[in-house]
Image (spheres, coloured by chain):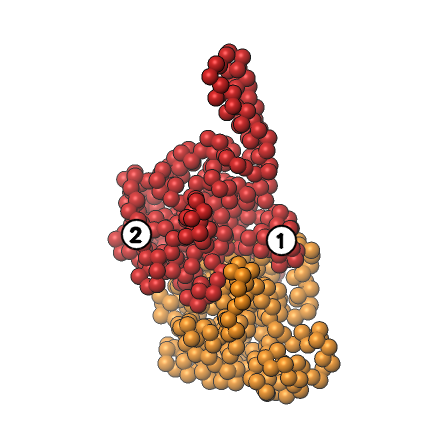
Chain colours: A red, B orange
C-alpha cells in the first residue's frame, strides 16, 4: 500500500513507490520491466529499512500523525469481529473524539474506548482532531463502570494531540474529569489494556491511560506535552519543535527504558500507514494474548498489581537509602 | 499538560514594574501601590482589594499549622535529571539555581502537623520552584504522604500552587506522577480517608488534572487562576477573547467545581471545621 502524500524524509521512498507503480501500470510488461520492478522493490525495502530503522524523535511524531495512519475506528473494523457503538455521556452530550462500545475479539467480549481523529475534513472537524472535551472523559467513565459491572475487559486506544483547550471545556471541568477518569481506572475491577496507537498527548492521553498493561505501537509517541508546546515555552518558539522532541524522550524505546510502557508492538516495515491490515493483525494478536493472560488472574491481584505498576514510576535520589540515616523516628 | 504560560503573579514582579523594592508593592489585583509591611501583616493579602499575593510553602505552613507542629517528611528526595534534559539551559543547572533561589529542595513540602490540635497529613506546593510543577520528586513525596495518611488514618490537606502542571523537564515521568498520586488517592478514598484540596493562584495543567481536583472538599482562595489549559493556549486555539473572569475561583464556583471560596485569613478555621465534620 502506498503511503500517499508523504513526509519530507520519505521523499526517496515516495519516488521509488511511484516509479514502481507507473511500471506496474504498463500494459505491455516485458521481462525487462519485470526485472526492473523487482530491483526497485528490493531497493524500496532497503530504503524503508534504513529510514524507518533510525527515525529520530521528530520524524516519529510525523509518522504518528500521518494522515493515513490507522485510527481507532480502523482497528475496530480490521481487528475486531464486531463493534456495537455506544454513544453519550448521559450528562451533556456525545463526544465524537471518544469512541466507545462493545466489541468482540476472538473469544473475548470487551469494552473498547478510543480517541478518534477522523479521516475526512468533516470527520476531523466533528472529532476536533482527536481532542476530547469533558463529555468525552465522562462518556469514557460511564462505559468503564458498565464494563466493570459486567466483567468486560476494557481496551483503550490512545491517539490524541491532547485534551481540547477551549472555553466550554474549561467550563465543564476538563481538569476535573481527567483526574476522575484516572481515579476510576486505577481501581477498576476488570482487566484494562491501554495501547498508544498514534499520539499520546499529555493529560488527554493519560485520562484513558491507566491499565494493567500499557503498550505502544513502535512509531507512536507519548509525552507530557506536545513538542510544539514545549518548544514554545522553553525555547520561546515553535520552530524548535524538533529539538524539544528529542529532549522529551518520548519514543517507544525511550518509554520502555524509563519503565513507562510494558510492551512495544512492532509496526509493518515503513510504518502502520503502509499496511493497515498487517498492523491490525499484530495488534489483534497482542490484545488476544494479553487478554488471556490478564483474565487468568484474580481481579484483586490485578488491581493491586496495577497500583504497584504506577507506584514504581519515577526517577529520583533517595539519600536516606544511601547515607547513614540521621537519628529520626 | 504544562500550562506554564500562565505565570504566577508573585511579588518579584514588582521589580520589573519599577516599584521601589522593599517598601511598596503594586497590587496585580487593583494596581494600587500598597505598603509591603501592611500586606505582609495581612498574610500577603492586599488591604485595598483583598487580592491574594504569592505565599511561600514555609509561610503557608506557618499560616495553617499550629506553631511548631510541622514535621517534614521525605525531604531527602532529590531530582536526578533522568532525561538529561536541556533547553536553553540544562535542567540539572536549573534545579540547583531554583534550590538556591527558593531555599526549597523541590516544588512540594510534605509532612505532618496540627491544625487547631487536629493531627493531619499536609502538603503544600510552592509556585516559585519551577512554576510549582510536578516531577518525580513531587509525585513521590505526595504519594508517600497519601500512603502515610492512609496507613495512619489521618485527614489529608494539600494546598496547591502550580502554574506548571506536570514538569516538562522530566518528560513522561512527570505525566505519570499524575497517575501515581491519583492512584494513591483512590486507595486513600477507599479506606475512608478525608482529603481537602486547597487551590491557590495558580493551579493549572497536570496538577489541576490530578490530585488538586480530587478533594472530598475543594476550597479555593479568591481570584486564583485555576484550569486545565493555559489561557494563552486557549486563546491561540480558538482565536477569540476569553471572558473576563475566565478560569478564576469565582468562575469555577459558578460552574460547580469548588465547594467554597475561602479567604486566607479563614483557611485554618475552615480546615479545622471541615475535619470536625468529616475526619476520623
Q: Please give the residue where the numbered disc 2 appears in the rendered image.
A: A86
Residue B70, position as x, y percentages in the image: 54, 77
From the viewer's side, name the closer residue of A308 and A140: A140
From the viewer's side, name the closer residue of B238 and B60: B238
Chain for numbered disc 2: A
Whether discs 2 and 1 lie on one chain: the answer is yes
From the viewer's side, name the closer residue of A57 and A33: A33
Q: Secondary structure at mark 1?
A: helix
At a point 64% along the width and 51% down the height, the residue shown is A239
At a point 42% along the width and 33% down the height, the residue shown is A278
Say few, some or many: other residues with alpha carbon within 10 Å of mark 2 (under 14 / 14 to 19 / 20 or more): some
Q: Please give the residue where the numbered disc 1 appears in the rendered image.
A: A238
Chain for numbered disc 1: A
- Residue at the far top: name it: A31
Q: Secondary structure at mark 2?
A: loop
Say few, some or many: other residues with alpha carbon within 10 Å of mark 1 (under 14 / 14 to 19 / 20 or more): some
Do the residues bearing badges 2 and 1 touch, measured as CB atoms within 8 Å? no
Disc on the earlier residue, 2 or 1: 2
The relative height of residue A80 versus residue A237 in the rendered view (above or below) is: above
Residue B42, image quadrant: bottom right
State the separation of the CA atoms marked 2 and 1.
38 Å
Residue A222, position as x, y percentages in the image: 51, 49
The relative height of residue A18 versus residue B225 in the rendered view (above or below) is: above
- Residue at the far left: name it: A150
Residue A322, position as x, y percentages in the image: 60, 58
Task: Residue A221: tell me if it is visible.
Answer: yes
The relative height of residue B164 versus residue B265 in the rendered view (above or below) is: above
Task: Residue A210: tell me if it is visible.
Answer: no
Q: Answer with left or right where residue B91 lies relative to residue B216.
A: right
Amino acid at each position: 500500500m502506498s503511503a500517499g502524500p508523504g513526509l519530507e524524509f520519505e521523499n526517496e521512498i515516495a519516488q521509488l513507490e511511484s516509479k514502481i507503480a507507473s511500471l506496474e501500470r504498463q500494459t505491455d510488461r516485458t521481462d525487462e520491466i519485470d526485472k526492473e520492478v523487482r530491483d526497485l522493490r528490493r531497493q524500496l525495502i532497503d530504503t524503508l529499512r534504513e529510514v524507518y530503522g533510525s527515525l529520530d524523535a521528530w520524524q516519529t511524531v510525523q509518522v504518528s500523525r500521518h494522515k493515513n495512519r490507522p485510527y481507532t475506528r480502523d482497528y475496530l473494523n480490521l481487528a475486531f469481529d464486531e463493534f456495537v457503538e455506544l454513544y453519550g455521556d448521559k450528562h451533556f452530550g456525545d463526544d465524537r473524539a471518544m469512541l466507545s462500545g462493545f466489541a468482540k475479539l476472538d473469544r473475548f467480549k470487551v469494552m473498547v474506548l478510543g480517541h478518534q481523529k477522523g479521516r475526512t475534513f468533516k470527520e476531523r472537524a466533528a472529532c476536533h482532531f482527536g481532542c476530547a472535551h469533558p463529555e468525552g472523559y465522562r462518556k469514557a467513565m460511564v462505559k468503564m463502570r458498565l464494563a466493570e459491572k459486567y466483567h468486560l475487559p476494557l481496551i483503550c486506544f490512545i491517539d490524541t494531540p491532547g485534551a481540547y483547550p477551549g472555553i466550554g471545556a474549561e467550563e465543564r471541568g476538563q481538569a476535573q474529569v481527567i483526574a476522575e477518569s484516572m481515579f476510576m481506572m486505577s481501581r477498576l475491577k476488570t482487566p484494562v489494556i491501554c495501547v498508544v496507537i498514534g499520539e499520546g498527548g499529555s493529560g488527554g492521553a493519560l485520562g484513558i491511560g491507566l491499565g494493567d498493561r500499557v503498550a505502544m505501537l513502535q512509531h507512536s509517541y507519548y509525552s507530557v506535552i506536545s513538542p510544539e508546546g514545549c518548544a514554545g515555552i522553553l525555547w520561546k518558539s515553535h520552530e524548535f519543535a524538533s529539538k524539544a522532541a528529542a529532549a522529551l524522550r518520548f519514543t517507544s524505546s525511550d518509554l520502555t527504558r524509563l519503565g513507562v510502557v510494558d510492551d512495544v508492538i512492532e509496526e509493518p516495515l515503513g510504518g502502520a500507514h503502509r499496511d493497515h491490515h498487517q498492523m491490525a493483525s499484530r495488534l489483534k494478536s497482542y490484545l488476544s494474548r494479553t487478554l488471556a493472560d490478564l483474565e487468568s488472574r484474580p481481579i484483586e491481584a490485578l488491581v493491586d498489581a496495577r497500583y504497584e505498576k504506577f507506584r514504581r514510576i519515577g526517577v529520583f535520589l533517595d539519600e536516606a537509602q544511601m547515607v547513614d540515616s540521621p537519628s529520626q523516628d | 499538560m504544562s500550562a506554564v504560560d500562565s505565570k504566577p503573579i508573585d511579588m518579584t514582579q514588582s521589580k520589573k514594574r519599577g516599584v521601589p523594592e522593599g517598601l511598596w508593592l503594586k497590587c496585580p489585583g487593583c494596581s494600587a501601590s500598597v505598603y509591603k509591611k501592611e500586606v505582609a501583616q495581612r498574610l500577603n493579602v492586599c488591604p485595598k482589594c483583598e487580592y491574594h499575593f504569592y505565599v511561600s510553602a514555609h509561610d503557608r505552613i506557618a499560616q495553617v499549622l499550629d506553631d511548631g507542629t510541622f514535621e517534614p517528611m521525605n525531604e531527602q528526595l532529590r531530582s536526578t535529571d533522568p532525561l538529561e534534559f536541556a533547553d536553553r539551559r540544562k535542567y540539572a543547572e536549573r534545579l540547583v539555581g531554583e534550590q538556591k533561589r527558593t531555599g526549597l529542595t523541590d516544588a512540594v513540602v510534605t509532612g505532618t502537623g496540627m491544625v487547631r490540635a487536629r493531627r493531619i497529613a499536609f502538603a503544600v506546593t510552592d509556585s516559585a520552584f519551577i512554576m510549582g510543577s510536578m516531577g518525580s520528586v513531587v509525585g513521590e513525596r505526595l504519594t508517600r504522604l497519601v500512603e502515610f495518611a492512609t496507613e495512619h488514618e489521618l485527614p489529608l490537606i494539600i494546598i496547591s500552587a502550580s502554574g506548571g502542571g506536570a514538569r516538562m523537564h522530566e518528560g513522561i515521568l512527570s505525566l505519570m506522577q499524575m497517575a501515581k498520586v491519583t492512584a494513591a488517592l483512590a486507595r486513600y478514598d477507599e479506606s475512608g480517608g478525608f482529603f481537602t484540596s486547597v487551590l491557590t493562584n495558580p493551579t493549572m495543567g497536570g496538577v489541576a488534572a490530578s490530585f488538586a481536583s480530587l478533594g472530598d472538599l475543594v476550597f479555593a482562595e479568591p481570584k486564583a487562576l485555576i484550569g486545565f489549559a493555559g489561557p494563552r493556549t486557549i486563546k491561540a486555539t480558538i482565536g477569540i477573547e476569553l471572558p473576563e473572569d475566565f478560569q478564576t475561583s469565582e468562575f469555577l464556583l459558578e460552574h460547580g467545581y469548588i465547594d467554597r471560596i475561602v479567604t486566607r485569613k479563614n483557611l485554618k478555621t475552615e480546615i479545622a471545621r471541615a475535619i470536625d465534620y468529616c475526619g476520623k
